[in-house]
Image (spheres, rainbow, N blue to C red):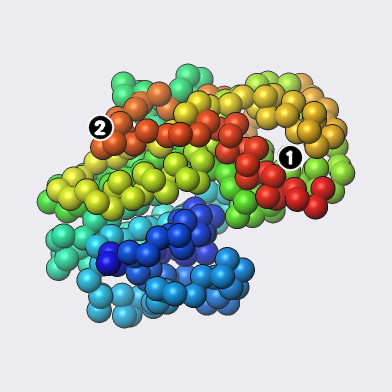
Amino acid sequence: MKKIAILGATGHIAKNLISNFKSLENHDLFLFARSDEKLNNFLKNINYRNGIEKIRLDGFANEKYDAVINCIGIGDPGKVKTIGPEIFRLTEYYDNFILDYLKGNSSCIYINFSSGAAYGTNFSVPADQNMINELDVNSIGKRDNYGIVKLYFEAKHRSYEDYNIIDLRVFAFFSRYIDLNSKYFITELISCIKTGKEFITGNNNMVRDYVHPNDLFNLINICINIRKINDAFDVYSLKPVTKFEIIDYFATNYGLKYKTKSYILGENTTGIKDNYYSINKKAENIGYIPEFSSMDCVISEAKELLKSV
């Protein structure tokens, strides 16, 4: 029986992990969330009652965990813009908390969700193993903050070379548990279908890599069973997808009405990312082979969100 602690248990990725753990019998979950009400409502909605313990930080160190999964963080561009500089302090607090736990629990593996933003803000081409973060240190702006946070924590984790830590760089994630009020391309598109509004987008194309929830869960299970590792891995699907492939699918199958406008290169919360995906397949070295493409993910998860349409 493995003991798995998940911090940020009401977050988008965490909800998918919890839902998938429900089908396994050899795991006990210890869940931390700032809102017990939100966590209880979610567990009730997925009918998950067994093998769950809710924890508070003051009692966190009382258990011996096989893995700690840190899902605390902000990915929604709208929230990143709103929280501003607090993004540094929020992530630092919980990361230090977990690192302190590892001091006395060397066999535990710490799985942290990082981001493709660790590569920087220039995604005119996809990331690969040779990509360099070209940060202009004399002109750091707000759009750099998110990526700097991710890069900082990866560097910090690599310095703790005797600890078992894996950083997973997620470039895009979409599922039935996503907050449709978040400011992503895919959530705004889904919301337009549900409300019947016209979807307006730039006439530029872009590429996204939505890892399927099942593939991400399989990767997490691989990581849980690894020991003596301290590394970062890019997370990828079987095949990325373009913006207009997604739009065409929803126009054909859900009657999406859309209009394009001139693409203006302007201010973006975390930078312009026309090719926001990775061809760095280093995760193959630990046994990760995705089964689903980005389009597979979009189709299956949108179907759950649009059941009533």
Q: Nearer the viewer, mark 1 or mark 2?
A: 2
Q: Mark 1 points at which residue?
A: 189
At 60% across and 55% down in the image, what residue appears? Answer: 177
Q: Which of marks 1 and 2 is nearer the N terminus?
A: 1
At 22% across and 71% down in the image, what residue appears? Answer: 64
Q: Name the residue under label 2.
A: 285
- Kindly indicate the quadrant of the structure image that contains residue 294: top right
- Per the model, the C-alpha gap separating discs 1 and 2 is 36 Å
Q: Is residue 246 left or right of residue 149?
A: right
Q: In this view, does 102 lie to the left or right of 185?
A: left
The amino acid at mark 1 is: Leu
At 51% across and 41% down in the image, what residue appears? Answer: 212
The amino acid at mark 2 is: Asn
Other residues around mark 1 within 10 Å, as few (<14) / some (14–19) / many (≥20)? many
Q: Where is residue 68 drawn, in percent x and y?
A: 31, 61
- Kindly indicate the quadrant of the structure image that contains residue 264: top right
Q: Which of 56 and 30 is in front in this view?
A: 30
At 28% across and 64% down in the image, what residue appears? Answer: 2
Residue at disc 1, secondary structure: helix
Q: In this view, does 190 lie to the left or right of 58?
A: right
